[in-house]
Amino acid sequence: MNKYEFLEALERNLQDVDFQIRHDALRYYQDLIENGGYDQEATIRNLGAPEVIASRIKAEQVNKAFEEGQFDNGPEVKVPTGQKVDKNLILIIAIVIVIASFSLGGIGGAFGILIGMGAGIFGLLAGLLSFGIISFVHGVNTLLLIENGFDTGNVLIHVGILLVNIALTFLWLALFIAIVKALPLIVKAVIEAVTRFVAWLRRLLS
């Protein structure tokens, strides 16, 4: 069970408790997991099942209610189910929308920069490849059609072959880095950021 599954399960089992208590509990256990070290799954296992934690929180609230004299009869005790209405809910939603807009704009800008850099590199390599092919063809023509053009044609052919090899080598290397290395990392980072934002938004509005 990872951090998000744990927090969602805990939130689900705390639906019938007060909003502030649920919010504080989720924040508390999220901080414990994030500050518990590199192995978050081991930290989660040490915390115990979300159901057990939720039951303990509910029991603590019931005991607190008895101590404060909110209930008279034990068998009739029920955990308060009312949820506080956040008077600033509309403001919070507006702030979240603004933050999300800027975040999406930043992600789009980052992708635009990466795409622009990639396009520039591939354009340079494509130009180098084209120049190599042209040099090779011109060298062959010089060698075959121009009298006393052996030396010039030979040089152009070798230059063309060299440029084509350089362009193809760097082109394959750039494709490998972009597809195999960079793209999965970018996609993973975006998915994780969106997942965290959605989980935070759900906890905020629950």
Image (cartoon, rainbow, N blue to C red):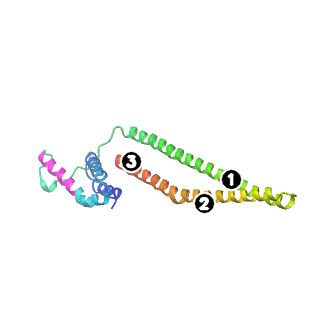
Q: Which residue is mark 1?
A: 128
Residue closest to the eye, 63 or 142? 142
**SS assignment at label 1:** helix
Q: Check the image and report above or below for 106 versus 188.
A: above
Range drawn in magenta: 55-67
Q: Is residue 87 left or right of residue 146?
A: left
Residue drawn at (51%, 55%) of the image = 182
Mark with earlier residue (2, 1): 1
Q: Which residue is mark 3?
A: 201
Q: Position of residue 173 (x, y in %)?
A: 58, 58
Q: Is residue 18 magenta?
A: no
Mark with earlier residue (3, 1): 1
Camera-nearest label, 3 or 1: 1
Q: Quadrant of residue 2?
A: bottom left
Q: Check the image and report above or below for 87 versus 120.
A: above
**SS assignment at label 3:** helix
Q: Quadrant of residue 170?
A: bottom right
Q: Position of residue 51 (x, y in %)?
A: 25, 60
Q: Are the residues tagged 3 and 1 within 8 Å (C-beta)? A: no
Q: Is residue 173 left or right of residue 22?
A: right
Q: Position of residue 69 (x, y in %)?
A: 12, 45
Number of numbered callouts drawn = 3
Q: Main structural element of the magenta stretch: helix, strand or loop? A: helix
Q: Which residue is mark 2?
A: 172
**SS assignment at label 2:** helix
Q: Amino acid at mark 3?
A: Leu
Q: Are the residues tagged 2 and 1 within 8 Å (C-beta)? A: no
Residue drawn at (35%, 56%) of the image = 4
Residue closest to the eye, 6 or 77? 6
Residue drawn at (54%, 57%) of the image = 177
Q: Are the residues tagged 3 and 2 within 8 Å (C-beta)? A: no
Residue closest to the eye, 139 or 182? 139
